[in-house]
Image (tube, rainbow, N blue to C red):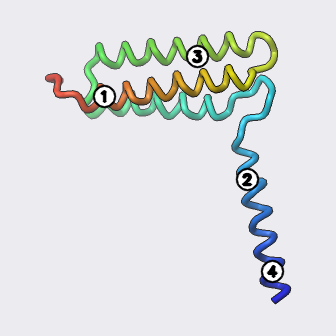
Amino acid sequence: MKKTLLAVAALILVLAVGAFADTEVIGKNTPAVNKRQKTQMKRIRQGVKSGKLTKDEAKALVKDEKDIQKAKKDAKASGTVTPEQRKALQQKLDDESKKIYQEKHDTEAK
């Protein structure tokens, strides 16, 4: 019984530490934003490759991604990315993600 309880407690501890490792801490680093940007660029490239995005759609989406990159750079300029700035960046990424989905699934002739 004690061994089982210790094993469960150890598992919970490992999971808790892993969960906190994924969250962004106050500072200049933005790993969650970086990961989402990388994923979204991959989605855009895949959309072009599969023919679901036109060249013009892809150019517009990449421009939006560059705007998000500039917003991230501006947020880092002070040395610390505040929680409010992180939230704003995540919202921009949410909006862009929806836009990528919409462009990939629209009925425009490709």
- Which amino acid type corresponds to the residue marked 4 in the rendered image? Leu
Structural crowding at the residue carrying mark 1, measured as other residues with C-alpha within 10 Å and reported as few (<14), some (14–19) or many (≥20): few
Q: CA distance from mark 1 to mark 3?
A: 21 Å
Sequence order check, earlier mark of 1 and 4: 4
Sequence order check, earlier mark of 3 and 4: 4
Structural crowding at the residue carrying mark 2, measured as other residues with C-alpha within 10 Å and reported as few (<14), some (14–19) or many (≥20): few
Left/right of residue 87 with respect to residue 67 in the rendered view = right
Closer to the eye: label 3 or 4? 4
Farthest residue in the front direction? 84
- Which amino acid type corresponds to the residue marked 1 in the rendered image? Gln
Q: Secondary structure at mark 2?
A: helix
Tag 1–tag 3 contact (CB < 8 Å): no
Closer to the eye: label 4 or 2? 4
Sequence order check, earlier mark of 2 and 3: 2
Q: CA distance from mark 2 to mark 3?
A: 27 Å
Q: Pointer 1: what residue?
A: 102
Q: CA distance from mark 4 to mark 2?
A: 20 Å
Sequence order check, earlier mark of 1 and 2: 2
- Which amino acid type corresponds to the residue marked 3 in the rendered image? Gln
Left/right of residue 51 with respect to residue 66 in the rendered view = left
Q: What is the x, y in percent for residue 4?
A: 78, 83
Q: CA distance from mark 1 to mark 2?
A: 33 Å
Q: What is the x, y in percent for residue 85?
A: 67, 20
66, 71: nearer the viewer: 71
At horizontal 17% and vertical 27% (from top left) the residue drawn is 107
Q: Pointer 4: what residue?
A: 5
Q: What is the x, y in percent for residue 81?
A: 74, 21
Tag 1–tag 2 contact (CB < 8 Å): no
Q: Pointer 3: what residue?
A: 69
